[in-house]
Image: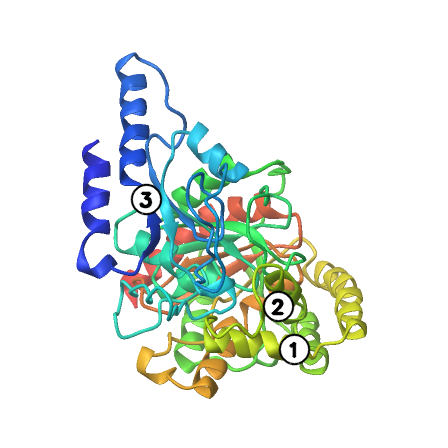
Amino acid sequence: MLHLDQAIASADAPAARHVFLTRDDRGLRSMARGLDAQLAQGQQIGPLGGAVVVIKGNIDLAGMPTTAGSRSFAAKAADRSAPLVSRLVQAGGLPMGHANMSEFAFSGLGLNPAFGTPLNALNPDLVPGGSSSGCASAVALGIADLAVGTDTSGSTRVPAAYQGLYGFRPSMGRYEDAGILPLAPSLDTPGPIARDLRGILQLDTVLRQRFTADFRDPAKRVVIPDAASLGEVSSAVVHMLYDTASDLISRGWSVDFKPVPALLDIRKLFAEFGSLVAAEAPAAIGAFTALDNPRIDPNVRLRLSQGLLIDPSKMAALRAARVLLQADMRKALGSALLLMPTVPGPPARLADVATPAEFAAENARALSLTMPTAFLDMPSLAMPVAGRVPGQSLSLSASSGGDDRLLEAAERMAPVLLKMGKEH
C-alpha cells in the first residue's frame, strides 16, 4: 500500500496537474488491498507484483469514459475494461487511470488544449511528445512504474524519446487491440512505455498473444541508414549515432552504414499520396463526432480536413505500396536489425508551436522517423542515450514479426547506450 500511497501523492502534485484525464483512487486502493490479502495468505500476485500502470485515455477502463482526450463528444463510461487491461490486472498490475494524450491520438507533440498539456519531466519548457504524452509524463515523473499507450505513427516512441524513456511499438497483432478507440485501424497498436527495458519486457510478456522467439542465431548485426535515407536530422543526433556505432563495433557488433531505399520511397509516397493515417483518421474519428466540431483541437481539426482530401484511389495505392515496401525492407535487412534515431532532434519548445504553421511543421518533424517504420509494421524500440537528454534516443527495429529477436538484441544493446550517456 505504501508504494500506491506514494504514487497517488505524486499524481496530486502540481507537476502532475495535466497528466491524468480520469482516476479512481478508491477503486485502486481496493484492488491494492486485494493484492495485499493474497500476499498475506502466501499467494502469488502475478509477474507485475503490484506495479502501478497508467493507461492511455483511448483504452477502455471499466467505469471510466473513454474520451481519447476530447471534449467533442459525450463519452460513456465503459462497461468493461479492454482485454489488455484485464491481462494487466490478472498479472498483478494496478491500473491507475486514464492518462492524458493528444486529442484522438492525432499528434506527435502531446499537446491537449481541452484538458491541458502534460509536463515534459525533463524540461517543462518543451513539448512532452505524443500522442501518449500523459503516459510518458507519468512514468518520467515517477508517478507510475509502467504505462500502456498506443502507437499509430510513433505515439509511444516519440514521447519516450522526448522524456528519456523506453517506448515499444510491437508488430500489429502481437497485443490484443479490442476496446481501444481507433485512429487509423491499419496502423494502430497498443504499446508499452517504461523507465527501463525490464519494464518493457515485463509488459510484453503479459500482453503478447503470440511468442515467436528463435534465439539460435541472436542478432548482433545492425544496418544504419545513410544520410539520404534518414533525411534531415540535427548534427547532435548524427554525432550520437556515429558515436554509438563506434562503441557497438568495439563491442563486437557488425555495423553496416548503407542506403535503405524503402525509407526514401516512403517519403516520396507520402509526398505524392498523403499518409495512410491521414487517410484513415477521418472515418475513424467521424464515428464519434463531427469533423468540423469546434470543440476539437484546431490543429487536429485541420489535419482531419486535410485527410478528407485523400481520395479512395490514393488510399488503395498507399496500401498496395505498403505490401511491396515491407518486402523491400525485409530483403534489405536480411538477418540484421535497423538502428536509427527515434526523432531527428530535440523537442520543440512549447512557445514555438503556438501557430498552426509552427505546430504542423514540428509535428511532421517529430514523426518523420517513426512514421515509416510504423507504415512497414516494423517492431521498434526507442531507447534513451546520452544521459536521458530530451531527444537523445535511438530506435532498434526488425522486420515485421521479429519482435522477440528484436527485444533479445535490445537486452544486449540498451546497457551500451546508457553507458554512452555516462561517457559523453
Q: Residue furthest top?
A: 41
At a point 29% along the width and 62% down the height, the residue shown is 387
User: Disc 1 or 2, which lies upstream in sequence?
Assistant: 1
Any part of residue 157 in sight: yes
Is 416 located above or below residue 127 in the figure?
A: above
Across and down, in percent, residue 231 comes to: 56, 80
At a point 62% along the width and 50% down the height, the residue shown is 171
Q: CA distance from mark 2 to mark 3?
A: 29 Å
Is 208 located above or below residue 115 in the figure?
A: above
Across and down, in percent, residue 206 comes to: 49, 35
Q: Nearer the viewer, residue 366 or 302?
A: 302
Across and down, in percent, residue 214 comes to: 63, 38
| CB contact under 8 Å: marks 2 and 3 | no
Give the structural element (helix, strand or loop) at label 1. Answer: helix
Nearest to viewer (mark 2 / mark 3): 3
Left or right? Give the position of 142 relative to 152. left
| CB contact under 8 Å: marks 1 and 2 | yes
Q: Which residue is mark 2?
A: 372
What amino acid type is highlighted by mark number 1? Arg
Q: Which residue is mark 1?
A: 267
Is 291 located above or below residue 3 in the figure?
A: below
